[in-house]
Amino acid sequence: MTEKQQVVVRFPPSPTGYLHIGGARTAIFNWLFAQKTGGKFILRIEDTDAERSTEESIRGILESLEWLGITWDEGPYFQSHFIKDHLAAAQKLLDSGHAYKCFCTKETLEKKREEARRKKTSLQYDGTCRNLTPEEVAQRQAAGIPYTIRLKVPRGEGFVSFEDIVYGIIEKRYEDIEDFVIVRSNGQPLYVLSNTVDDIRDGITHVIRGQDGLANTPKQILIYRALGAPIPKFAHMSLTLDPKKAKISKRTHGELVAVQFYKEHGFLPWAFVNYLALLGWSTPDSREIFSKEELIEAFSLEGINRANAIFDVRKDDPKFFTDPKAISINTHYLRNLPVEEIAPYVKTELEKAGIWDPAYEAEKQAWFFHTIDLIRSRFHVTTDFVTAGRAYFADDYPIEAKPLKKNILKHKGLKQWFPELADRLERLPEFTLETTEQVIRDMAEELEIKAGILINGVRTAVTGQPKGPGIFDVLITIGQKRVVERLRKAVALFEASSPL
RNA sequence: GUCCCCAUCGUCUAGUCUGGUCCAGGACACCGGCCUUUCACGCCGGCAACACCGGUUCAAAUCCGGUUGGGGACGCCA
């Protein structure tokens, strides 16, 4: 059988914090590749750093992935459950002469590194224990001296080379690779070993990870070789940097780079995936909006850009709370998806704000959908429905200061006109686009004022906003009764604001 | 210090492999105009980039070399 081997990829986060956009991007690319090739996507939690791994972090990461819609076929597996495998591999390496015990202490090593730094030479391990005789080793072990296990990197002229799917042929001379540690002196395996052994066991065919793993690759290839395991294909992705070109990190950017932040700030999950996919990946036609099916269809590892991309977070920008491009993509989906698809997200926001009415899913559903459709063209994130859009769903909405001043207080006559208008609107037997417009325009004419004065005054009184859909649409959507009430109540606005 | 990677508008990028169709295309952002009861949408227009130097060539954003700049790795972290 020459049947093509099934693609197997994995996403191996270490549970030391929330899922940040860099990790999410790695997960997305792996997932897309698996989807595209009909392969398998494994989730593996690399929790061998017990000191820093937390239960809470694992939960958060899984939640974020689920929110994004990134599904996995196997796992989550936990690296800590396979430590025996890792150590068995180390023993095998020792037995086959591919690795050796190193009795150098941390202190000596640090001293040597310090020395090297000072003399500005290479910081590599000098191989002190590489050529210990079996007797010397036995002697030290008998003396109870703790040891690490190091891989015996081939010496001489050769080099490790591999073809990275994104970066092309990468070569690294043996002399530039030190005899790296694979097992700590406390007997615990190190990432470079565990990760490789896990990938071998899981049958990983493609390692798709950040470019920061590029330097590790030659070392891992050496392990694959020494273990006699087939070497997977590698695809390193460019990194995501901040506007100052520093690597994005939880530490310096806090919640702004957490996937969860975007969930909380009104992003549609797919819009966010779409945006993230565009950071460092593109199609020849620079297309930007993709449905899930379209993105899977269009995806290819070759489309990954080699240059790092900048996540244009704008801290303290009054206009954008994050990368404007991310917002614009979200806006696109928010305004163009079928209303039924965004309704659940609006529901979530209304519930969070405590103004959800179950009738929106029953007898008021048509109204609910219509309202979402009416107001969404001015919104960017789902949270806008309970901020700028609050007046449509609740009676306790704030009146913004600026329009209050400009559209209401500036026109003293409105104090009399609001109740009068309320009366006239209340008397309408039919509350429609046409009748409400007729009433307002007639009244403006009688008063010999511009219709805009009434219109903008009403808009502000009824929605609290300086902007919004056409006013007559607003009126009939909010409804006759509520509009009349709000106009009558608006008179109080003149009292509340002190005379100036 | 050593090793590796990268370099097109402010940002994401197309174009680079297979030189000419690119005095460089799209999107976001920004600026102006139209529309309009407001704001947004929409439409129209504008600003804005091949890091630098040298080489190869009839021809270079594209190929080669160097410089500069940026990033990453160099841990008994993952």
Image (cartoon, coloured by chain):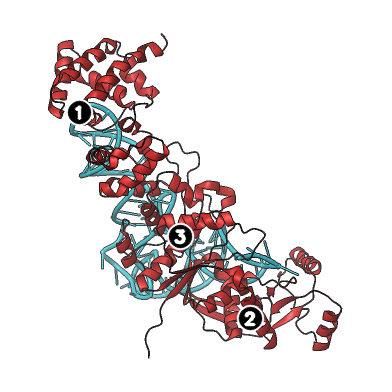
Chain colours: A red, B cyan
Quadrant of residue A138 within the rendered picture: bottom right
Quadrant of residue A79 within the rendered picture: bottom right
Q: Is residue A458 above or below residue A263?
A: above
Q: Residue placed farthest to the top in the image?
A: A499
Q: Residue at x 30, y 63 (%)?
A: A293
Image x and y of residue A403, in percent: 34, 23
Image x and y of residue A278, in percent: 39, 58
Residue receiving disc 3:
A25
Decide which of tag 3 and tag 1 comes sooner along the chain: 3
Instruction: Check disc 2: other Cα within 10 Å, few if <14, some if 14-19, many if 20+.
Output: many
Image x and y of residue A64, in percent: 47, 55
Q: Residue at x 75, y 72 (%)?
A: A185
Q: Residue at x 31, y 47 (%)?
A: A342
Left or right? Give the position of B73 relative to A274: right
State the CA–CA distance, disc 3 to disc 1: 45 Å
Residue receiving disc 1:
A472
State the CA–CA distance, disc 3 to disc 2: 31 Å
Task: Give, as a three-letter code, the residue at label 1.
Answer: Phe
Q: Is residue A401 above or below residue A413?
A: below
State the CA–CA distance, disc 1 to disc 2: 74 Å
- Contact? badges 3 and 1 (CB < 8 Å): no
User: Pointer 1 indicates a residue of which chain?
Assistant: A
* Helix, strand or loop for disc 1: helix
Whether residue A307 is visible, yes or no, is no
Quadrant of residue A435 within the rendered picture: top left
* Helix, strand or loop for disc 3: helix
Decide which of tag 1 and tag 2 comes sooner along the chain: 2
Task: Give, as a three-letter code, the residue at label 3.
Answer: Arg
Decide which of tag 3 and tag 2 comes sooner along the chain: 3
The one of A260 and A247 positioned closer to us in this rendering? A260
Disc number placed over residue A303 in the picture, else none: none
Disc number placed over residue A89 in the picture, else none: 2
